Image: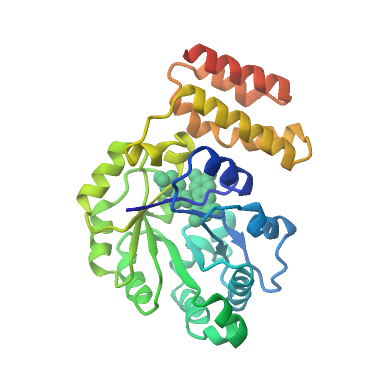
Amino acid sequence: MNIYFAPMEGITGRVYRRVHHRFFPGIDKYYTPFISLTGNLKLKARDRKELEPAENPEISLVPQFLGNDPEAFRKGIRYAGELGYSECNINLGCPSKTVTTKKKGSGLLDEPELLKKLLDGVFEEPEQIFDGELQSTIGKMDISVKTRLGGSDPEEIFSLLDLFNRYPISELTIHPRVRDEGYRGRVHLDYFEECLRRSENPVCYNGDIRTVHDFSLIAEKYPNLRAVMIGRGLVGNPALVREIRGGAPLTAEELKAFHDSLLESYMEAFQGDEYVSIRHMLELWPFMKENFSDSDRLIHKIFKTKRLSDYRTAVDKLFEDRR
Ligand SMILES: Cc1cc2nc3c(=O)[nH]c(=O)nc-3n(C[C@H](O)[C@H](O)[C@H](O)COP(=O)(O)O)c2cc1C
């Protein structure tokens, strides 16, 4: 089964992906955190850097786009094709209010007309995306979709599937929660199961896989599933995919070496800006702290640090206490 690293804004950017791939190779695909596409398609310099092939060496990467403007999507997909990407992903899952109030991400799930217009624009006129020459250079561009079950009611997924089934979506990743649930509560596996039956496009499962056991439950329950996507579980245990594939469990030494290398890479990427580098590292700790039981006080200390030397001291102490 294919296993993908889920896109996570603020975490799985180019720096993280590079270091993760170096320490824990074996992820079938990484997805970029969402890149916002607006009418004028002025991609931010930061987003262009995120997509630069040189920034993602040897990594199988899928650009993920967020927005609701078909023209902007066509341009974004074209840009990705020019860079050599062979798949782009449409974000229909983001539950953040700042995104959904603009009818983007999961804000599109209860806007059927807008959603249809976007999908029509992306799928129906490929010649508007690629001219003949480019088309022959890159071959076919796969378009995948990452979705939730709906806005407020999981029953919404059935009319959404009727719509999705009209397009050749290369892979439909389903996070079986609705927008209003955020990441709370249990995933609706009963609905996911029905999606597997009804989707005419290949389906990928995403949600709450944190351990090898969680993965095995899903793999056994759905033996024909071709892919799963893992987010928080992989940030918490960056060796999770190796473990799922029968490899050695993560050691504290390995996690520390990965952590230190990532910190060093952020410092380099942000030209020695301690504050920004620490902010990036702190995004990981809500998930990495799962590796440390009875360490609330030390973890709390890590979150309070503002200077690099204090941060390093607090992290070293946490790892020493674990020994
Ligand atoms: C901090 C954070 C950032 C996220 N950023 C994105 C994003 O940029 N694009 C996206 O499609 N999903 C994003 N997600 C959702 C994840 O990709 C994934 O669907 C979600 O975490 C559920 O999977 P998991 O239980 O394996 O973590 C984000 C989730 C979190 C917690």
Up the image or down, 244 lies above or below 227; here it is above
Left or right placement of residue 191 versus residue 29 in this view: left
Up the image or down, 82 lies above or below 229; here it is below
Residue at position x 35%, y 58% from top?
Answer: 204
Q: Position of residue 98 (x, y in %)?
A: 59, 55
> Total label count?
0
Of 124 and 79, which appears nearest the observer? 79
Task: Report the coloring of the rendering.
Answer: rainbow
Residue at position x 21%, y 48% from top?
Answer: 220
Residue at position x 61%, y 78% from top?
Answer: 71
Q: Position of residue 84 (x, y in %)?
A: 59, 68
Residue at position x 61%, y 85% from top?
Answer: 133
Q: Quadrant of residue 51?
A: bottom right
Q: Position of residue 211 (x, y in %)?
A: 34, 36
Q: Position of residue 216 (x, y in %)?
A: 26, 43
Of 32 and 24, which appears nearest the observer? 24
Left or right placement of residue 155 versus residue 276 in this view: left
Q: Is there any visible trace of residue 315 in the rendered image? A: yes
Q: Quadrant of residue 191?
A: bottom left
Up the image or down, 7 lies above or below 307; here it is below
Q: Is there any visible trace of residue 182 in the rendered image? A: no
Of 140 and 219, which appears nearest the observer? 140
